[in-house]
Amino acid sequence: MRFMILVKADKNTEAGVLPDEKLLTEMGKYNEELLKAGVLLAGEGLPPSSKGARVRFSGGKRTVTDGPFTEAKELIAGFWLWQVKSKEEAIEWVKRCPNPTGTEGEIEIRQVFEAEDFGAELTPELREAEERMRAHLQQSGKP
């Protein structure tokens, strides 16, 4: 099972405050543990929402809004993509994580859909196209 682990933003991450050396060291050690355990597929920190944009869809219309966005608690400061056996295992790994903000914070755990989750709607042709894309990504070294 794959899970996306979402590190929620706070006022400091939204202000562009970067982690200090101590937190970078702790996170580096934690990421090494994840890697050695075969859990880590990908992981990155994200710049503040002021550097981002949103695209709103309304039928065929697209509207672009540049950041920053106001609800920091709804924003993401970073993520991991993990391969684990269960949600419970993902929870146990998150509980071992250094506190990413050093103060109050939150990490969200979300399971990633797999092809079989889509049932009959994912036709053999669509499944084959999905498998080709995944094979290409693996060859290029991307998750």
Image (cartoon, helix red, strand yellow):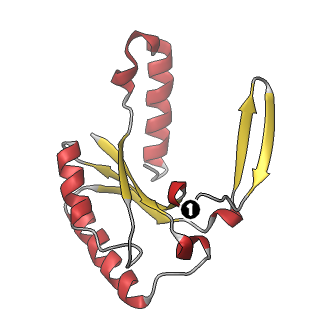
Q: Mark 1 points at which residue?
A: 72
Image coordinates for residue 111, horizontal then vertical, percent: 34, 40
Image coordinates for residue 45, horizontal then vertical, percent: 49, 67
Under circle 1, the secondary element is helix
Residue at 39% over, 67% down: 105
Please tell me how crowded label 1 is: few (under 14), some (14-19), or many (20+) other residues with Cα within 10 Å: some
Residue at 26% over, 60% down: 94
From the viewer's perspective, is 3 left or right of 66?
Answer: left
Name the foreground residue: 81 vs 69.
Answer: 69
From the viewer's perspective, is 138 left or right of 39?
Answer: right
Specify the quadrant that holds the N terminus. top left
Quadrant in which residue 42 is drawn: bottom left
Quadrant in which residue 118 is drawn: top left
Residue at 56% over, 62% down: 72
Q: From this view, report whether residue 52 is shown above or below residue 62.
A: below
Mark 1 residue type: Ala
| Residue 70 visible in rendering | yes
Q: From this view, report whether residue 21 is shown above or below residue 61.
A: below
The number of numbered badges drawn on the structure is 1
Image coordinates for residue 26, horizontal then vertical, percent: 31, 81
Residue at 55% over, 65% down: 46
From the viewer's perspective, is 71 left or right of 122?
Answer: right
Name the foreground residue: 131 vs 98.
Answer: 98
| Residue 123 visible in rendering | no
Image coordinates for residue 34, horizontal then vertical, percent: 25, 63
Which residue ends up furthest to the bottom in the rendered image?
A: 21
